[in-house]
Image (tube, rainbow, N blue to C red):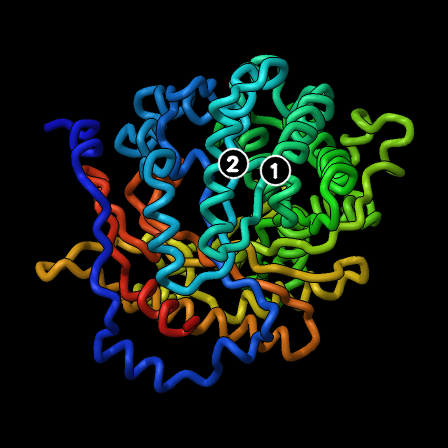
């Protein structure tokens, strides 16, 4: 039986939700509880369309840049693609029921642009519109508040063929797309996020060439930066116009940047990395401009700034999404032309123990989420912060008794949440927390080799098993 046949013939199976003795002991050791975060706090999980939906040629969906990249042999680990992914397109109802069983009250998901507009603009795909209506309705029927991310990296290939984010016309393309979404779903959905992690899809996609569409160089990156920054306000104003009582945000990938040594050179390198990873996209939206004083090469962006842009660029978001996993430690590197620094080797240079590094190679550093919440909370124009992604990758396996034990991830969530609460108690207005991710999924260039989920997915059969981390959340949130 091939993979597609197995998917069609196998149902959903969630594991027992009873807590193991170890989890009971861990719960007893907790120094905080759900109530400490406040009664209106959003407790959610998150996914992204390309990573979970599958059904890539179903019901009129067009091709995205990630379809194109993953179908080129050797580009993604193990030649994995999102063609089937978690088959969420066909299994969303049972997946949401499992989510509800874990006591989450919010779900962050993204919409596939090419499922709504197969050619990126123009003709609307009614089947795509219908799918998200059904998904939203199911959330609401279960008492789960839907949070829509308008763009989570899967740009229609037809638009990339016209220049993608380097083409200023994307302001109009994105506006058309946002108009459609808000008019269709705005009566049901009040919580909207414009973009997911601009520094990742912008930097990895248009500067370093790691992610789709794998462009490189400042000649691609600088126009992309400006258009990405501009689109947040363009789309934000459309959401406000079309959605009554809209709550509008956007998300940023961010993390603490520490110098390896207490030297002038290492500190300057850390400041440059901080300007890139943590400041470059949020500060223009807050009306502070691009951090050109730290990153001199950003002055080249002036070529793409038209009259009136800097006045239109700021937008008064209701909240900012912070997405944090780890930190970066850097040291001076005169050969690096962008930052004058490089990230250090965690094991060799930092002497970090193997158990404090996740399977994807990121340091477990709970204090980092506290520090970055304080850093972002210090911006006077940031009204509220929601942790829209936080989680850990692991090499999870199903045991002989049908369980998935992930004690490292349970510990990770406990420690990171403790630091979120610390920031909140110190005055940072944190309004919610979304665990990344709801279930194991297609993890971009890593394919299916990395598992971030609190629900395990057996990809050949599409069986679901709630991991110990999911059981921990169920008990914590009840």
Residue sitting nearer the eye, 140 or 227: 140
Quadrant of res 148? top right
* Marks 2 & 1, CB-CB < 8 Å contact: yes
Q: Residue at x 47, y 18 (%)?
A: 62
Using a 10 Å C-alpha cutoff, classify the residue at mark 2 as few (fewer than 14 neighbours), some (14 to 19) or many (20 or more).
some
Q: Is residue 360 visible?
A: no
Name the secondary structure under disc 1: helix
Q: Residue at x 52, y 19 (%)?
A: 125
- Badge 2 or badge 1: first in the primary sequence: 2
Q: Position of residue 97 (x, y in %)?
A: 36, 53
Looking at this view, name the residue that lies furthest to the front. Answer: 141
Residue marked by disc 2: 133
Left or right of residue 424: residue 328? left
Q: Residue at x 41, y 52 (%)?
A: 437
Residue marked by disc 1: 185
Q: Position of residue 265 (x, y in %)?
A: 65, 57
Q: Position of residue 344 (x, y in %)?
A: 47, 55
Quadrant of res 4? top left
Q: Could you tell me which quadrant the N terminus lies in?
A: top left
Quadrant of res 478? bottom left
Residue sitting nearer the eye, 42 or 437: 42
Residue 204, compared with residue 264, is above or below; it is above
Q: Residue at x 56, y 26 (%)?
A: 216
Using a 10 Å C-alpha cutoff, classify the residue at mark 1 as few (fewer than 14 neighbours), some (14 to 19) or many (20 or more).
some
């Amino acid at each position: 039986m091939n993979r597609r046949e197995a998917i069609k013939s196998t149902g959903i199976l969630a594991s027992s939700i009873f807590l193991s003795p170890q989890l009971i002991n861990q719960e007893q050791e907790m120094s905080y509880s759900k109530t400490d975060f406040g009664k209106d706090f959003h407790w959610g999980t998150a996914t992204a369309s390309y990573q979970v939906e599958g059904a890539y040629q179903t019901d009129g969906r067009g091709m995205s840049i990630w379809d194109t990249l993953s179908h080129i042999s050797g580009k993604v680990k193990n030649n994995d693609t999102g063609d089937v992914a978690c088959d969420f397109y066909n299994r969303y109802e049972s997946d949401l029921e499992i989510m509800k069983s874990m006591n989450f009250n919010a779900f962050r998901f993204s919409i596939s642009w090419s499922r709504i507009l197969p050619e990126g603009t123009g003709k609307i795909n009614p089947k795509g519109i219908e799918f998200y209506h059904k998904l939203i309705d199911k959330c609401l029927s279960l008492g789960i508040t839907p949070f829509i991310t308008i763009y989570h990296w899967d740009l229609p290939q037809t638009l990339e063929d016209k220049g993608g984010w380097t083409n200023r016309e994307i302001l109009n393309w994105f506006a058309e797309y946002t108009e459609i979404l808000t008019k269709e779903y705005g009566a049901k959905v009040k919580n909207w996020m414009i973009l997911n992690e601009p520094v990742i899809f912008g930097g990895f996609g248009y500067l370093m060439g790691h992610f789709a569409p794998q462009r490189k160089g400042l000649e691609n990156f600088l126009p992309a930066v400006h258009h990405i920054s501009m689109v947040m306000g363009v789309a934000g104003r459309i959401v406000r116009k079309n959605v009554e009582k809209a709550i509008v945000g956007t998300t940023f990938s961010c993390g603490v940047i520490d110098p390896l040594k207490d030297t002038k050179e290492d500190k300057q390198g850390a400041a440059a990395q901080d300007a890139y990873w943590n400041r470059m996209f949020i500060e223009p939206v807050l009306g502070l401009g691009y951090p050109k004083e730290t990153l001199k090469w950003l002055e080249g962006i002036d070529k793409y700034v038209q009259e009136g842009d800097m006045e239109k660029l700021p937008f008064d978001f209701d909240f900012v999404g912070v997405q944090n996993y780890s930190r970066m430690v850097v040291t001076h590197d005169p050969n690096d032309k962008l930052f004058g620094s490089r990230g250090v080797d965690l094991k060799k240079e930092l002497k970090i123990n193997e158990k404090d590094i996740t399977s994807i190679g990121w340091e477990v550093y709970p204090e980092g989420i506290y520090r970055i919440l304080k850093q972002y909370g210090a911006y006077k124009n940031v009204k509220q912060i929601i942790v829209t992604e936080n989680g850990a990758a692991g090499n999870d396996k199903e045991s002989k008794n049908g369980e998935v034990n992930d004690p490292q991830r349970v510990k990770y969530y406990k420690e990171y949440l403790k630091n979120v609460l610390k920031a909140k108690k110190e005055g940072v207005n944190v309004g919610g927390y979304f665990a990344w991710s709801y279930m194991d999924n297609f993890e971009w260039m890593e394919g299916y080799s990395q598992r971030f989920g609190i629900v395990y997915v057996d990809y050949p059969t599409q069986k679901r098993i709630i991991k110990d981390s999911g059981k921990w959340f169920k008990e914590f949130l009840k």
